[in-house]
Image (spheres, helix red, strand yellow):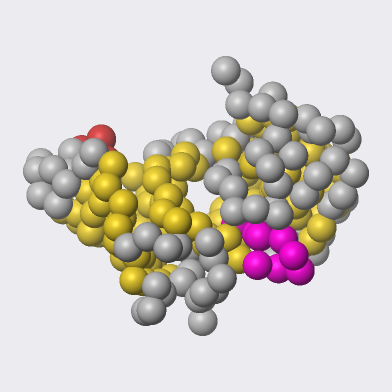
Amino acid sequence: GEDVEQSLFLSVREGDSSVINCTYTDSSSTYLYWYKQEPGAGLQLLTYIFSNMDMKQDQRLTVLLNKKDKHLSLRIADTQTGDSAIYFCAESRASGGSYIPTFGRGTSLIVHP
Amino acid sequence: NAGVTQTPKFQVLKTGQSMTLQCAQDMNHNSMYWYRQDPGMGLRLIYYSASEGTTDKGEVPNGYNVSRLNKREFSLRLESAAPSQTSVYFCASSEFGVATNEKLFFGSGTQLSVL
């Protein structure tokens, strides 16, 4: 199975909240990340959370981390059409003394009026 | 503010042809990475360079070679392109390197088609 798992699609109405979920495998990951990819573009870091935190809030974004269950979620409040994109969860996985960024398959968020 | 620059943006190759994808960053970052993105597969790491002068294999290195030319530049070479290498390729960099958990900065990608 996949190491970093996400659902592939999420559809929401404009103004509603969106919640994108992710599970990861490496309990040694110090940071966990959310990246956003808009059509035809590279990925941009959206937010990240340090592993000793349970929650991080940044304007409309809320990241929740359940380290026991290795579960990460991204909540976008008041979702707008401009939030339509692919969202990638990522962990930094320990590998021979290095930390290699490892990504999930991405969740396509579709926001409709 | 150029960040990470990849060239070319688009490329079409015939099976068996070779080509080099170029990547340069102007942020004085230590580590650089090459990923490929396929539909429904997310990003898979091909090779990375933890620091100038070093390179290591990632998850899917077969059919590729890399060169860390200097601190700024990290190129990806396909010696004999195959249709299975049709993908979007992303270069990325990070500041302090793979010894710490660092966020990545990405280029805008190269769309490669191998016929």
Q: Looking at this view, is A71 or B67 the one in front?
A: A71
Q: Residue at x 47, y 39 (%)?
A: A44
Q: Position of residue A95 (x, y in %)?
A: 71, 68
Q: Position of residue B64 (x, y in %)?
A: 81, 55
Front position in the image: B84 or A95: A95
Task: Answer left or right for B34 relative to B101.
Answer: right
Toward which corner of the image does residue B76 lie, by quadrant?
top right
Region of the chain picked out in magenta, as a range: A94-102
Q: Nearer the viewer, residue A19 or B52?
A: B52
Tell me the residue at 85%/41% (across/down): B52
Name the outermost residue toward the top.
B1
Q: Kindly report the secondary structure that dominates the magenta region of the rendered protein.
A: strand
Residue A100 included in the magenta stretch of the image: yes
A62, above or below B69, in the image: below
Please tell me which residue is depicted at 34% across the width and 71% down the height of the picture. A66
Q: Please state the horizontal and vertical placement of residue B87, each as a whole percent of the image.
A: 61, 51
In depth, the one of B89 and A65 nearer the eye is: A65
Figure quadrant of residue A19: bottom left
Q: How many marks?
A: 0
B64 within the magenta span:
no
Image quadrant occupied by the N terminus of chain B: top right
